[in-house]
Amino acid sequence: MKLTFPLLDASEVRDARALLHAAPWADGRTSAGVQAAQVKNNRQLPSDCEAARILQALVLQALHRSPRFLSAALPRKVFPPHFNSYTGTANSFGIHVDNAVRYTPAGVQVRTDLSCTVFLSEPDDYQGGELVVHDEQGGQRVKLPAGHALLYPGASVHEVLPVTRGERLAAFFWVESLVRGNDERSLLLALDTALVSLRGRDGESAEAVALTGVYHNLLRLWATT
Ligand code: NI
């Protein structure tokens, strides 16, 4: 399941870009796994700098007020977001897979059920830089408006194409979900989406209550807390 959703508003994007433009960037390879490090060529914000801490809080707060994210990801743990820049000669991240388990700077293990990229530059501000997630349908090139996010399975083979003009700023992070399986999570999202629509049309009907019970009983069956 791949899902796009709006996350940050225009003023949050402006604030994020201002912080990133003044930030102390480092080589992105320091946080990659062995295979990924060979193809990773970008710059990344050190996760312990002040700008990173402010921006991590900004993104995490936005995630917790996003019904679409919460419904789709059913987050159990969210990795503190990384921030990266693709420009000049540090401008791409070749085809790779992310490690299945990541350790936060505080040493917390996060199983990477889902990956998420939040675009922070406007599409017109750079050329190239599409995120390509390879799945059964082939590779789909994704470039979203600033403030919008793409959520995709953490097991996907993916890459960021070279930026040939301008700068691509983005946040990315992983999510360990309460529901490990993509199929189960997709069914819960479909049911929740239909329920929201049913309630919008008919209010709190007996059917809506019964189906809400089904939703929670499935979640109870599949969730690991
Ligand atoms: Ni990756």
Image (cartoon, rainbow, N blue to C red):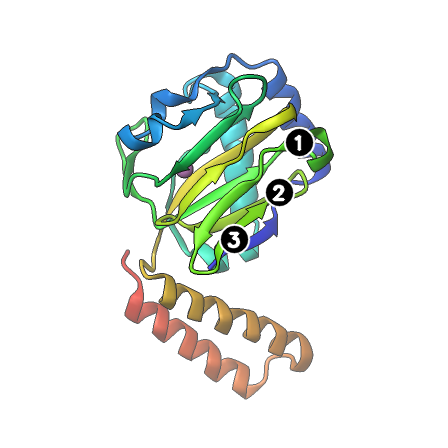
The amino acid marked with disc number 1 is Gln
Which label was assigned to residue 54? Answer: none
116 or 203, which is in the foreground?
116
> Can residue 61 be seen by looking at this rendering?
no
Left or right of 159? Residue 68 is right
Q: Label 2's element?
A: loop
Contact (CB < 8 A) between labels 3 and 1? no
Residue hosting label 3: 69
Q: Earlier in the sequence, mark 3 or mark 1?
A: 3
Q: Label 3's element?
A: helix
Left or right of 25? Residue 15 is right
The amino acid marked with disc number 3 is Phe
Q: Nearer the viewer, mark 1 or mark 2?
A: 1
> Can residue 120 be seen by looking at this rendering?
yes
> Disc 3 and disc 2: Cα gap in Å?
18 Å
Q: Label 1's element?
A: strand
Task: Find residue 80 and report its horizontal and vertical position in percent.
Answer: 42, 33
At 56% from the left and 39% from the top, the residue drawn is 118
> Disc 3 and disc 1: Cα gap in Å?
28 Å
Q: Quadrant of residue 208?
A: bottom right
Residue hosting label 1: 127
Disc 2 crowd, CA 10 A, few/some/many (<14, 14-19, 20+): some
84 or 204, which is in the foreground?
84
At 51% from the left and 32% from the top, the residue drawn is 57
- Name the quadrant of the C terminus: bottom left
Residue hosting label 2: 143
At 37% from the left and 67% from the top, the residue drawn is 183
